[in-house]
Image (spheres, grey):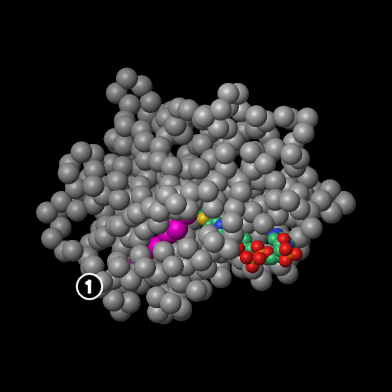
Amino acid sequence: MIRSTILGLGSYVPDRIVTNEEIPFLDDQHVRQTEQQTQTNDEWIRARSGIEARRYVPNDGEWPTSRLGQIAAERALADAGVDAKEVDCIIFATLSPDIHFPGTACFLQTRLGISGENGCACYDIRQQCSGFLYGLQMADAFIRTGMYRRILLVGAEVHSHSLDYTTRGRDVMVLFGDGAGAVVLGPEENDDPTSGVVYTSVGADGSGAMDLYLKVFEIAKAPFVQYDWKNRDENSIMYPQMNGKRVFLHAVRSMVVATKKALATTGLTWEDIDWFVPHQANLRINEAVAQYAEIPAEKALNSIMFYGNTTAATVPLTIDHWRQAGKVKKGDLILSAVFGAGYTFGAGIFRV
Ligand code: ACO
């Protein structure tokens, strides 16, 4: 039977490392000042989230999300040995699109030099931190039905420009970083149920939608954009808003349930799985998930310490980080669980 398989993987993070020591001194252009700008500190950030540093793109107007996605995509294509011209579908997961419309996948397609009258299908998906697994499920279904043969799945974010660099926004601001990850998927004739993409299951609970959101505009109102640049401090519409405690509790519960369901449905055990790769929102969330889902500590991979929360990019970025470090090997079986704004959630089991 036709199964889908991951042919290649790539990731990208910007060069600029912003440490917890530096972050209190950043102004709203994320330029380091001598005076402290935000009441926060390394001890609080490390203790509550496990984050030590994150990466930021240069603030020169030249780094939209599609550009980070392009670098990750080119690395994934090279890893797969697939030419960009062979890609017949792009799925781009992001909550920080280049502009409101058109979707970022269209910009990525042009960046890859594959636009034109016969250009491939381009999807943007909006499932925040669950975007990569939602995209993996879509790609898996497309390939199994024979719809597409070379799917480029990208998760990428530029968060650094949309954070509130004041004490008011510190609960969210310290958590997020910029980054991108990508995989290339294709079909494989294989009857082994543990090959390729083994399992995906995703869901949502929209009743939690306003526990974590960024409005930017409200289409129900006229004018639908109410940003007053002279009064930036009052414009909470410009910044992400989060009920951190509720998000934390739901994230742990959802990822534990999704992980247990993935094992129960497939009949696999931790003996079979090489690595657990959870979404990287908070190291404390991931430690709690590992405890309640009884995941062997040595199988849990995290990267939030180095990159913060990169939303749709965290899963491929974490896998690629640990592959480059020599831990993750070609063909390893990964169980990934995710949770994000929406609420959205899910789990997947797949070989890399
Ligand atoms: N630095 C210093 N102090 C801070 C900071 C900060 N960056 N942020 C908040 N505080 C203060 C608060 O103001 C509060 O002070 P008070 O007691 O004087 O009122 C105190 O620290 C404790 O705040 P809490 O909100 O109770 O802290 P908590 O232990 O809940 O940790 C955190 C906050 C880290 C945000 C936690 O709730 C969390 O991680 N939630 C989940 C966040 C998350 O995962 N978001 C994204 C997931 S979904 C997605 O990725 C899209």
Q: Answer with the quarter of the image where residue 296 lies.
A: bottom left
Q: Position of residue 3 (x, y in %)?
A: 19, 53
Name the residue at the top extreme: 117
Residue 337 belongs to magenta span:
yes
The residue segment tinted magenta is 335-340
> Taking the image as drawn, is residue 162 in sight?
yes
Comparing 202 with 305, the one in front is: 202
Q: Which residue is mark 1?
A: 267
Q: Amino acid at mark 1?
A: Gly
Residue drawn at (67%, 57%) of the image: 171
Residue drawn at (17%, 44%) of the image: 145
Name the residue at the right extreme: 35
Main SS of the magenta part reads strand
Q: Answer with the quarter of the image where residue 53 lies.
A: bottom right
> Taking the image as drawn, is residue 317 in sight?
no
**Which quadrant contains ligand 1?**
bottom right
Residue drawn at (59%, 56%) of the image: 243
Q: Position of residue 146 (x, y in %)?
A: 17, 42
Q: Position of residue 44 (x, y in %)?
A: 71, 67
- Categorize mark 1 by other alpha carbons within 10 Å: few (<14), some (14-19), many (20+): few
Residue 252, compared with residue 216, is above or below; it is: below
Q: Position of residue 189 (x, y in %)?
A: 15, 53
The local secondary structure at tag 1 comes to loop
